[in-house]
Amino acid sequence: MSLQAAIKRLSLIIDKVSRSHYPTKKEILKYVRDTGIKISDRTLDRDIEKLRDEFGVELIYDIPKNGYYIDKENSLEFSSFLRLIELNETADLITTSLKEGKENFKYIDFETSSDFKGVQQLKDLYKAILSCHYISFYHTNYHTDVTKKFFNMEPYLLKEYQNRWYLVARMKGFKNFITFGVDRITHLEINDEKFTRADDMKVHELFSEIIGLVYSTSDVEEVLMKVDEKQVKYFESLPWHESQDIFIKNGKTFMRLYVRPNFELIQKIMMQGEFIEVLKPEWLRNKIAQLHLNTAKKYGQ
């Protein structure tokens, strides 16, 4: 069975457990088989182990309830796995469309970026991360429009954000990490020399308490916002952060996050305009208010 088909099977298992209330093994097997995919009891056991060991998804059997559930709190890679499923489904859609003829593409409108540059070297960057090889490359800064060469960089993580890929790396001998847009990396070289990655270095956790890419060393704060009830469904379907909590109090709708405030958070708040009001922290409320005043002035208000 192809990897794509195997991921499809895993996604069906996750879908059944997520949608049902403690489904039994028999119910999970039936759900997968009803889609036309063959699966045995032994295969299901192996898939559950694979989800836990390879994808970090804690699929737990609850003895009193005689069924399975997902321990999302301890499934550190759960969101990444869901993204993998999404990519797999997209790839399956594209493959099916190609088999049925290019004419069918007029019925699908993918979100595309204006530049495909950089995607071709994702595989090389990924290999360098896995093998712990130093890399060197040129990178262009969008803000300064300056191109600079970076030598002996330790690649640690590939991160996707808003339909673009980024490399998280650090310079040899330094502790701080730098984020590079892959589409702005050129002349990539994988060096022969290797570096030693610390066993306790989990770079993805640096981004677990922020939104986006701009890592902040500030403290985690409660960000409380009053939101327009008409926008709630959008916030629920596309959460801003894993800590997001939406609740109603005294007839008003609120959204709470526990994050390290950064540039991307401010951007997301500003994009909502009049549909969101920051209540906490006070400094962020004042900053957003000032940004709105600055915008109003540009329109002569």
Image (cartoon, rainbow, N blue to C red):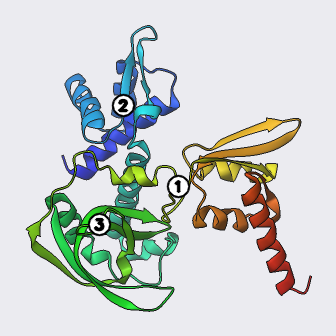
Q: Quadrant of residue 59?
A: top left
Q: Earlier in the sequence, mark 3 or mark 2?
A: 2
Residue placed under numbered mark 3 in the picture: 174
Say whether residue 61 is left or right of residue 19. Answer: left
Q: CA distance from mark 2 to mark 1?
A: 23 Å
Instruction: Specify few, some or many for label 3: CA neighbours under 10 Å numbering under 14, 14-19, or 20 or more.
Output: few
| Above or below, comparing residue 26 to residue 178 in the picture | above
Q: Earlier in the sequence, mark 2 or mark 1?
A: 2
For the point 39% across and 10% down, which residue is it? Answer: 63
| Above or below, comparing residue 39 to residue 194 in the picture | above
What amino acid type is highlighted by mark number 2? Glu
Instruction: Specify few, some or many for label 2: CA neighbours under 10 Å numbering under 14, 14-19, or 20 or more.
Output: many
For the C terminus, give its image quadrant: bottom right
Instruction: Specify few, some or many for label 1: CA neighbours under 10 Å numbering under 14, 14-19, or 20 or more.
Output: many
| Above or below, comparing residue 286 to residue 182 in the picture | above
Q: Secondary structure at mark 2?
A: loop
Q: Which mark is residue 210?
A: 1
Q: Secondary structure at mark 3?
A: loop
